[in-house]
Image (cartoon, rainbow, N blue to C red):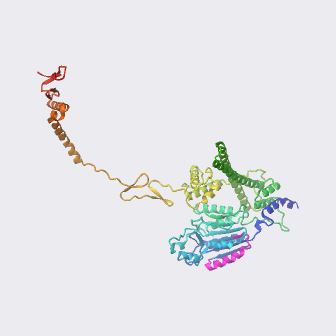
Amino acid sequence: MRKLLRLCPLLLASMLLFGTDPAFAGKRVALVLANSAYQHAPTLTNPINDGAVMAKTLKDAGFDSVDYRHDLSALDTRRVLRDFADATRTADIAVVYYAGHGLEVEGSNYLIPVDAKLERDTDVYDEALSLDRILIAIEPAKQLRLVILDACRDNPFGKGMKRTAVSRAIGRGLAQVEPNSPNTLIAYAAKAGFTAQDGDGANSPFTVALSRHLTTPGLDVRRAFGYVRDDVLKSTGNKQEPFVYGSLGGEDVPLVPVKVAVAAPGMPVATPQADIRRDYELALQVGNKAAWDAFLAQHPDGFYASLAKLQVEKIGAEQAHAAAIAKAKQAEAERDRLAALGAQKDAQAKAAADAKAAEQAQLAAQKAKEQAQQQAAAAEQQRVNLAAAAPSAAPASTASPAGANVASLTPATAPADLNRSVQTELGRVGCFSGAADGNWNASSQRSLSQFNRYAGTKLDVKVASTDALDAVKAKPSRVCPLVCEHGFKADGDQCTRIVCGNGYALNDDNECEKKRAAKPAASATSRRDDSEDRPARQRRQAGGAAAGGVEGLGAAGGIAAAAGAGRAAGGGQVFCNSTGCRPVSRGCHLEYRGGGGPGNEANAEVCH
């Protein structure tokens, strides 16, 4: 009776959220398809192995029905899907796993049976199965519809396929898809437009990671795929990144519930620590603040109390972030309203300041939320690992006092992994060219700032956040423009060298312009002849001037001509009177006598 009273708050919180039937009590069905023995293409080694592993994983997880089929023809596959659709009508969770070849034609995805020939591009409509056919089969499931495709391999059918229309596009890998039905997830082994690896072992890296994380008891399916993504990136050297399309609600949806053991008659009574762990797992299933408050009211101290407090902090941080977003939007709307009405400058300035403060508060709340989420996730993963390693043993820190620093369980690599993921995505959209090393430095911040500029977002560039990762992932193609060095031009996603035609050269503006013709240079012979002829020309000119000095040039010209003649005679002086000018005779010189004017010469020629 005491135990029943102790669990009442938790059971009440569970009923408030889920009703009288717990969410994990529903029926779970799965269909596993694997195609290896293709009749008109090389045989694939891994799909049949991958299908066997996934079928065993789901059976071991307690699924009510797991139908495993391999190497089916198109007709047989359609029949199996029809039968599986009947099973999903009474199911809460329906899962379809497919391994084999897939093909994307004009944005639609197709699964290829083993008897497909696909000689023409239009044959895909008759010989393959559309992904939409799979979604129709699982649509009746009530809580979760999950499709897992390990079908992103290099496809041999697309290379030899005849094209009936030039405009019909056949893509590489699978195309991005957005499910129309709610509570539907579609998981790819590699993101849209990329191919997946088969791996070096008997199973693909994607399937190995799925078998390790997907059926972890109590682990939300979205978080499970997050762990799968991390494992595949690590095992493939960041060459392959799984991707999940679709969305679920705010509550956790584990593929496998946490089993609550009930002691049978004659079995040993559960220990107090086991009771606390069971209560914690029940509160984790409920996941709201009321459930955690009820747990802490019954178990205020110890290891699980510390974990529960982290969950409460996470919920509080998420609520504070949502409130900050609403307040920032309200302040921004008020600022815009006053500006549109032409209110007084003081009122507009105050509204602008309030909007700025609300924006800063939103950023601070976002950081606090992300930190709380990381700490809670890391602590929960640590708890799951401990339980898996020693399910009957109490955690080493069970005796920790209240308020123990459980945040120290956060792996040191958690922020680096987030940084590396954001860097990788920024590189994919053309905003980051460095190495994805997990170091969020100035270069990474500039890259995120570039993304904000061209994507129209307002992400905080100082830290790599989950919001930034989601925003960048949402962009299917390049966002930042490609910048090339001088001499190169952007050609799609690559820089190609600019080649100018004959007679053209590349200028400083990275454009080809016509070369200018060079001026012909004078030859050495012509320059030598011209220099030798120049003194003769000068002498002829001087002689001509002297011959017509007084008569042709006037007084001034006559004086200059006479002076030139005098210098030639050796005296250097010129005597002028009313009759004209002449050089001073050899051996004579001029003397100044004063005066000057008509009939009175100022100079006299004196000879000795």
Q: Nearer the viewer, residue 269 or 186?
A: 186
Q: Nearer the viewer, residue 599 or 42?
A: 599
Q: Which residues are magenta?
A: 71-94
**Quarter occupied by residue 155:** bottom right
- Residue located at (60% from left, 71% from top): 46
The answer to whether residue 41 of the structure is visible from this angle is: no
Where, quadrant-wise, is the C terminus in this rendering?
top left
Residue 84: within the magenta?
A: yes
Q: Residue 383: x percent and y percent?
A: 73, 58
Residue lying farthest to the bottom in this orientation: 75
Residue lying farthest to the front in this orientation: 598
Residue lying farthest to the left in this orientation: 608
Q: Residue 229: x percent and y percent?
A: 63, 62
Where, quadrant-wise, is the N terminus in this rendering?
bottom right
Q: Is residue 342 left or right of residue 537?
A: right
Q: Residue 510: x percent and y percent?
A: 43, 54
Q: Nearer the viewer, residue 259 or 141?
A: 141
Q: Is residue 103 left or right of residue 20?
A: left
- Residue located at (62% from left, 71% from top): 131
Q: Residue 519: x percent and y percent?
A: 30, 50
Residue 127: within the magenta?
A: no
In the picture shown, does residue 503 fall above or below 161? above
